[in-house]
Image (cartoon, rainbow, N blue to C red):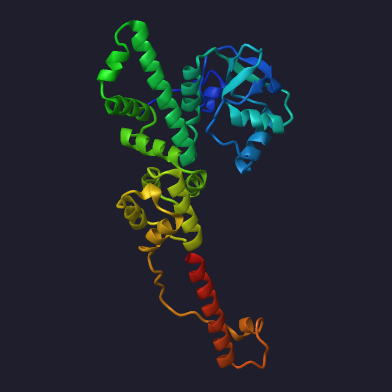
Amino acid sequence: MAAKREKIHFETVEELLGAPVTKDATTEIRIDQIYPFENHPFKVVDDDKMSDLVQSIRDNRVIVPVLVRPDDEGTYEMISGHRRMHAAKLAGLATIPAIIKPMTNDEATIAMVDANMQREEILPSERAFSLKMKMDAMRRQGYRADLENGTCGSECHKSEDADTLNKKTREEVGESFGLKGRQVQNYIRLTELIPELLDMVDNKHLAITLAVEISYFSKEIQHAIYVNYKETGAMTKEQIQVLKNQTNLENATEYTLKQLLNSVQPEIKEAGRISFTRKKLDQYFPKNYTMQKRQEIIFSLLDDWKNRREGADV
Protein backbone atom coordinates (compact mmCIF):
# COMPACT_ATOMS: atom_id res chain seq x y z
CA MET A 1 0.00 0.00 0.00
CA ALA A 2 1.43 3.35 -1.00
CA ALA A 3 2.28 5.70 1.78
CA LYS A 4 -0.11 8.59 2.21
CA ARG A 5 1.40 11.88 1.16
CA GLU A 6 1.28 14.55 3.81
CA LYS A 7 0.18 17.97 2.62
CA ILE A 8 2.58 20.78 3.38
CA HIS A 9 0.95 24.14 4.11
CA PHE A 10 2.88 27.36 3.63
CA GLU A 11 1.68 30.28 5.68
CA THR A 12 3.43 32.93 3.58
CA VAL A 13 5.06 33.53 0.22
CA GLU A 14 8.39 33.84 2.06
CA GLU A 15 8.04 30.27 3.33
CA LEU A 16 7.23 29.05 -0.17
CA LEU A 17 10.36 30.73 -1.53
CA GLY A 18 12.53 29.40 1.28
CA ALA A 19 13.22 32.88 2.63
CA PRO A 20 13.76 33.56 6.34
CA VAL A 21 10.47 33.92 8.16
CA THR A 22 10.13 36.38 11.01
CA LYS A 23 7.28 37.40 13.25
CA ASP A 24 8.58 40.98 13.50
CA ALA A 25 6.32 43.70 12.11
CA THR A 26 7.11 45.07 8.67
CA THR A 27 7.10 48.80 7.94
CA GLU A 28 7.42 50.68 4.66
CA ILE A 29 10.49 52.94 4.86
CA ARG A 30 11.71 55.51 2.37
CA ILE A 31 14.81 54.20 0.65
CA ASP A 32 16.57 57.55 1.02
CA GLN A 33 16.36 57.10 4.80
CA ILE A 34 18.49 53.93 4.70
CA TYR A 35 22.29 53.92 4.46
CA PRO A 36 24.64 50.92 3.92
CA PHE A 37 26.19 48.99 6.78
CA GLU A 38 29.58 50.45 7.66
CA ASN A 39 32.45 48.52 6.02
CA HIS A 40 29.98 46.16 4.39
CA PRO A 41 32.16 43.41 2.81
CA PHE A 42 29.64 42.06 0.30
CA LYS A 43 29.75 43.55 -3.18
CA VAL A 44 26.62 44.79 -4.92
CA VAL A 45 27.20 44.28 -8.64
CA ASP A 46 25.08 45.32 -11.62
CA ASP A 47 25.24 41.95 -13.36
CA ASP A 48 22.66 39.68 -15.00
CA LYS A 49 21.38 38.47 -11.63
CA MET A 50 20.82 42.06 -10.54
CA SER A 51 18.89 42.70 -13.75
CA ASP A 52 16.69 39.68 -12.99
CA LEU A 53 16.11 40.95 -9.45
CA VAL A 54 15.17 44.41 -10.72
CA GLN A 55 12.63 42.92 -13.13
CA SER A 56 11.22 40.69 -10.37
CA ILE A 57 10.75 43.71 -8.12
CA ARG A 58 9.09 45.64 -10.94
CA ASP A 59 6.65 42.76 -11.36
CA ASN A 60 6.07 41.79 -7.72
CA ARG A 61 7.68 44.57 -5.63
CA VAL A 62 9.97 43.51 -2.74
CA ILE A 63 8.60 40.30 -1.22
CA VAL A 64 11.11 39.68 1.58
CA PRO A 65 11.58 42.74 3.84
CA VAL A 66 15.05 44.09 4.52
CA LEU A 67 16.44 44.27 8.05
CA VAL A 68 17.54 47.65 9.41
CA ARG A 69 18.41 49.19 12.75
CA PRO A 70 17.42 52.73 13.78
CA ASP A 71 19.91 55.42 14.71
CA ASP A 72 19.53 58.61 16.73
CA GLU A 73 19.06 60.78 13.62
CA GLY A 74 15.78 59.26 12.46
CA THR A 75 17.47 57.24 9.71
CA TYR A 76 18.33 53.55 9.44
CA GLU A 77 21.40 51.40 8.87
CA MET A 78 20.97 48.44 6.53
CA ILE A 79 21.74 45.10 8.14
CA SER A 80 20.46 42.65 5.53
CA GLY A 81 19.12 43.55 2.10
CA HIS A 82 21.70 45.70 0.31
CA ARG A 83 21.06 43.98 -3.04
CA ARG A 84 17.28 44.23 -2.66
CA MET A 85 17.51 47.93 -1.82
CA HIS A 86 19.80 48.60 -4.80
CA ALA A 87 17.44 46.71 -7.10
CA ALA A 88 14.45 48.58 -5.66
CA LYS A 89 16.16 51.88 -6.49
CA LEU A 90 16.82 50.73 -10.05
CA ALA A 91 13.19 49.60 -10.30
CA GLY A 92 12.07 53.11 -9.39
CA LEU A 93 10.64 52.39 -5.94
CA ALA A 94 10.66 55.12 -3.32
CA THR A 95 9.96 52.85 -0.34
CA ILE A 96 10.86 49.32 0.72
CA PRO A 97 9.35 46.95 3.31
CA ALA A 98 11.64 46.69 6.32
CA ILE A 99 11.91 45.13 9.74
CA ILE A 100 13.23 47.68 12.23
CA LYS A 101 15.23 46.10 15.01
CA PRO A 102 17.39 47.95 17.57
CA MET A 103 20.80 46.25 17.89
CA THR A 104 24.21 46.93 19.37
CA ASN A 105 27.13 47.33 16.97
CA ASP A 106 28.30 43.77 17.57
CA GLU A 107 24.78 42.31 17.31
CA ALA A 108 24.33 44.18 14.02
CA THR A 109 27.66 42.89 12.68
CA ILE A 110 26.83 39.28 13.50
CA ALA A 111 23.32 39.58 12.02
CA MET A 112 24.72 41.18 8.84
CA VAL A 113 27.30 38.42 8.37
CA ASP A 114 24.90 35.57 9.15
CA ALA A 115 22.31 36.85 6.68
CA ASN A 116 24.71 37.46 3.79
CA MET A 117 26.74 34.27 4.22
CA GLN A 118 23.64 32.31 3.18
CA ARG A 119 24.04 33.50 -0.40
CA GLU A 120 24.86 30.85 -3.00
CA GLU A 121 27.83 32.69 -4.50
CA ILE A 122 30.33 34.40 -2.21
CA LEU A 123 33.74 35.66 -3.26
CA PRO A 124 36.72 34.60 -1.14
CA SER A 125 37.33 38.25 -0.19
CA GLU A 126 33.71 38.64 0.95
CA ARG A 127 33.92 35.48 3.03
CA ALA A 128 37.29 36.55 4.47
CA PHE A 129 36.22 39.98 5.70
CA SER A 130 32.81 38.80 6.93
CA LEU A 131 34.38 35.98 8.97
CA LYS A 132 36.86 38.44 10.49
CA MET A 133 34.09 40.89 11.35
CA LYS A 134 32.01 38.21 13.05
CA MET A 135 34.98 36.78 14.92
CA ASP A 136 35.99 40.21 16.24
CA ALA A 137 32.41 40.94 17.29
CA MET A 138 32.06 37.60 19.10
CA ARG A 139 35.34 38.13 20.94
CA ARG A 140 34.16 41.54 22.13
CA GLN A 141 30.80 40.12 23.16
CA GLY A 142 32.40 37.28 25.11
CA TYR A 143 34.75 39.64 26.92
CA ARG A 144 31.95 42.02 27.94
CA ALA A 145 29.70 39.16 29.04
CA ASP A 146 32.41 37.87 31.37
CA LEU A 147 32.84 41.31 32.90
CA GLU A 148 29.08 41.89 33.32
CA ASN A 149 28.51 38.47 34.87
CA GLY A 150 31.44 38.85 37.19
CA THR A 151 32.82 35.49 36.05
CA CYS A 152 35.99 36.90 34.63
CA GLY A 153 38.00 40.07 34.31
CA SER A 154 40.98 41.44 32.50
CA GLU A 155 43.35 39.30 34.56
CA CYS A 156 41.31 36.20 33.73
CA HIS A 157 41.62 36.88 30.00
CA LYS A 158 45.31 37.54 30.36
CA SER A 159 45.76 34.19 32.07
CA GLU A 160 44.28 32.27 29.18
CA ASP A 161 46.53 31.97 26.17
CA ALA A 162 45.46 34.32 23.35
CA ASP A 163 45.91 31.57 20.77
CA THR A 164 43.55 29.33 22.75
CA LEU A 165 40.90 32.05 22.87
CA ASN A 166 41.26 32.71 19.14
CA LYS A 167 41.02 29.01 18.37
CA LYS A 168 37.79 28.66 20.39
CA THR A 169 36.25 31.66 18.62
CA ARG A 170 37.36 30.45 15.17
CA GLU A 171 35.79 27.05 15.79
CA GLU A 172 32.54 28.64 16.98
CA VAL A 173 32.38 30.96 13.99
CA GLY A 174 33.23 28.17 11.56
CA GLU A 175 30.63 25.82 12.98
CA SER A 176 27.81 28.20 12.02
CA PHE A 177 28.94 28.11 8.38
CA GLY A 178 30.11 24.52 8.05
CA LEU A 179 33.79 25.46 8.21
CA LYS A 180 36.61 24.15 10.36
CA GLY A 181 38.54 26.52 12.59
CA ARG A 182 41.59 26.17 10.37
CA GLN A 183 39.58 27.18 7.32
CA VAL A 184 38.31 30.26 9.14
CA GLN A 185 41.89 31.18 10.04
CA ASN A 186 43.01 30.83 6.41
CA TYR A 187 40.17 32.97 5.11
CA ILE A 188 40.88 35.69 7.67
CA ARG A 189 44.54 35.71 6.60
CA LEU A 190 43.36 36.84 3.15
CA THR A 191 42.36 40.19 4.68
CA GLU A 192 46.09 40.92 5.05
CA LEU A 193 46.67 40.82 1.28
CA ILE A 194 47.14 43.93 -0.82
CA PRO A 195 44.07 44.64 -3.02
CA GLU A 196 45.76 43.50 -6.24
CA LEU A 197 46.53 40.03 -4.84
CA LEU A 198 43.09 39.74 -3.25
CA ASP A 199 41.51 40.47 -6.63
CA MET A 200 43.61 37.66 -8.09
CA VAL A 201 42.15 35.29 -5.47
CA ASP A 202 38.60 36.41 -6.30
CA ASN A 203 39.25 35.90 -10.02
CA LYS A 204 40.76 32.44 -9.39
CA HIS A 205 44.21 33.48 -10.65
CA LEU A 206 45.80 32.83 -7.24
CA ALA A 207 45.10 29.76 -5.10
CA ILE A 208 43.92 30.43 -1.56
CA THR A 209 46.63 28.22 -0.05
CA LEU A 210 49.41 30.16 -1.78
CA ALA A 211 47.69 33.48 -1.01
CA VAL A 212 47.69 32.60 2.69
CA GLU A 213 51.46 32.06 2.58
CA ILE A 214 51.95 35.40 0.84
CA SER A 215 49.74 37.18 3.40
CA TYR A 216 52.46 36.81 6.06
CA PHE A 217 54.81 39.10 4.10
CA SER A 218 54.76 42.87 4.49
CA LYS A 219 52.73 44.97 2.07
CA GLU A 220 55.96 46.10 0.37
CA ILE A 221 57.09 42.53 -0.31
CA GLN A 222 53.59 41.57 -1.47
CA HIS A 223 53.73 44.45 -3.94
CA ALA A 224 57.10 43.22 -5.24
CA ILE A 225 55.65 39.73 -5.70
CA TYR A 226 52.70 41.16 -7.62
CA VAL A 227 54.87 43.38 -9.85
CA ASN A 228 57.12 40.43 -10.66
CA TYR A 229 54.07 38.34 -11.54
CA LYS A 230 52.81 41.04 -13.91
CA GLU A 231 56.21 41.07 -15.63
CA THR A 232 56.89 37.33 -15.79
CA GLY A 233 53.53 35.62 -15.33
CA ALA A 234 55.00 33.46 -12.55
CA MET A 235 53.93 33.18 -8.92
CA THR A 236 54.71 29.74 -7.49
CA LYS A 237 55.06 28.11 -4.10
CA GLU A 238 58.76 27.56 -4.86
CA GLN A 239 59.27 31.29 -5.29
CA ILE A 240 57.45 32.06 -2.04
CA GLN A 241 59.48 29.43 -0.21
CA VAL A 242 62.71 31.09 -1.37
CA LEU A 243 61.54 34.36 0.16
CA LYS A 244 60.51 32.63 3.40
CA ASN A 245 63.98 31.10 3.72
CA GLN A 246 65.68 34.49 3.58
CA THR A 247 66.80 36.32 6.72
CA ASN A 248 66.39 40.08 7.06
CA LEU A 249 64.06 40.06 4.06
CA GLU A 250 62.40 43.33 5.10
CA ASN A 251 65.61 45.22 4.29
CA ALA A 252 65.98 43.68 0.83
CA THR A 253 65.93 46.05 -2.12
CA GLU A 254 63.41 45.74 -4.93
CA TYR A 255 66.19 44.48 -7.18
CA THR A 256 67.17 41.78 -4.65
CA LEU A 257 63.57 40.64 -4.29
CA LYS A 258 63.27 40.41 -8.05
CA GLN A 259 66.45 38.36 -8.31
CA LEU A 260 65.26 35.98 -5.59
CA LEU A 261 61.89 35.48 -7.25
CA ASN A 262 63.41 34.92 -10.68
CA SER A 263 66.05 32.51 -9.34
CA VAL A 264 63.41 29.79 -9.24
CA GLN A 265 61.23 30.99 -12.06
CA PRO A 266 60.03 27.87 -13.87
CA GLU A 267 61.00 27.37 -17.48
CA ILE A 268 58.12 27.23 -19.89
CA LYS A 269 58.34 23.93 -21.71
CA GLU A 270 55.99 23.48 -24.61
CA ALA A 271 56.08 20.83 -27.29
CA GLY A 272 56.15 21.83 -30.93
CA ARG A 273 57.64 24.74 -32.82
CA ILE A 274 56.80 28.34 -33.57
CA SER A 275 55.84 28.96 -37.18
CA PHE A 276 54.59 31.92 -39.22
CA THR A 277 52.61 31.85 -42.41
CA ARG A 278 53.88 33.80 -45.41
CA LYS A 279 50.63 35.78 -45.40
CA LYS A 280 51.29 36.86 -41.80
CA LEU A 281 54.91 37.86 -42.50
CA ASP A 282 53.90 39.79 -45.62
CA GLN A 283 52.18 42.26 -43.29
CA TYR A 284 55.59 43.30 -41.93
CA PHE A 285 58.10 42.73 -44.76
CA PRO A 286 58.35 43.78 -48.40
CA LYS A 287 57.32 40.91 -50.65
CA ASN A 288 60.72 40.83 -52.34
CA TYR A 289 62.50 39.94 -49.05
CA THR A 290 63.65 36.32 -48.99
CA MET A 291 62.81 34.06 -46.03
CA GLN A 292 66.50 34.12 -45.03
CA LYS A 293 66.46 37.93 -44.97
CA ARG A 294 63.29 37.99 -42.92
CA GLN A 295 64.72 35.51 -40.44
CA GLU A 296 67.86 37.63 -39.97
CA ILE A 297 65.76 40.73 -39.23
CA ILE A 298 63.53 38.86 -36.76
CA PHE A 299 66.49 37.55 -34.77
CA SER A 300 68.17 40.96 -34.86
CA LEU A 301 65.05 42.54 -33.35
CA LEU A 302 64.88 39.79 -30.73
CA ASP A 303 68.51 40.43 -29.77
CA ASP A 304 67.75 44.13 -29.32
CA TRP A 305 64.70 43.30 -27.17
CA LYS A 306 66.74 40.90 -25.03
CA ASN A 307 69.50 43.47 -24.46
CA ARG A 308 67.00 46.17 -23.47
CA ARG A 309 65.27 43.79 -21.06
CA GLU A 310 68.53 42.72 -19.42
CA GLY A 311 69.62 46.34 -19.17
CA ALA A 312 66.39 47.23 -17.36
CA ASP A 313 67.06 44.51 -14.77
CA VAL A 314 70.44 46.01 -13.75
Image spot of residue 46 (x, y percent): 64, 40
User: Which residue is pictured at 43% across the width and 78% down the height?
Assistant: 272
Q: Nearer the viewer, residue 4 or 172?
A: 172
Residue shown at 67% from the left, 81% from the top: 283
**Residue 238, image x, y percentages:** 33, 57
Between 257 and 53, the residue placed more toward the observer is 257
Residue 59 image position (x, y, % from top left): 69, 31
Vertical comparison of 90 with 252: above or below: above
Q: Is residue 226 left or right of residue 73?
A: left
Q: Position of residue 129 (x, y in %)?
A: 47, 33
In this rendering, position of residue 152 left or right of residue 274: left
Residue 170: image quadrant is top left
Label total for image: 0
Quadrant of res 28: top right
Classify 106 as above or below 299. Answer: above
Quarter location, residue 212: top left
Position of residue 20 relative to residue 314, above or below, is above
The residue at 51%/44% (across/down) is 195
Whether residue 41 appears in this view of the structure is: yes
The residue positioned 65% from the left and 13% from the top of the image is 73
Q: Quadrant of the N terminus?
A: top left
Confirm whether residue 66 shows in the render: no
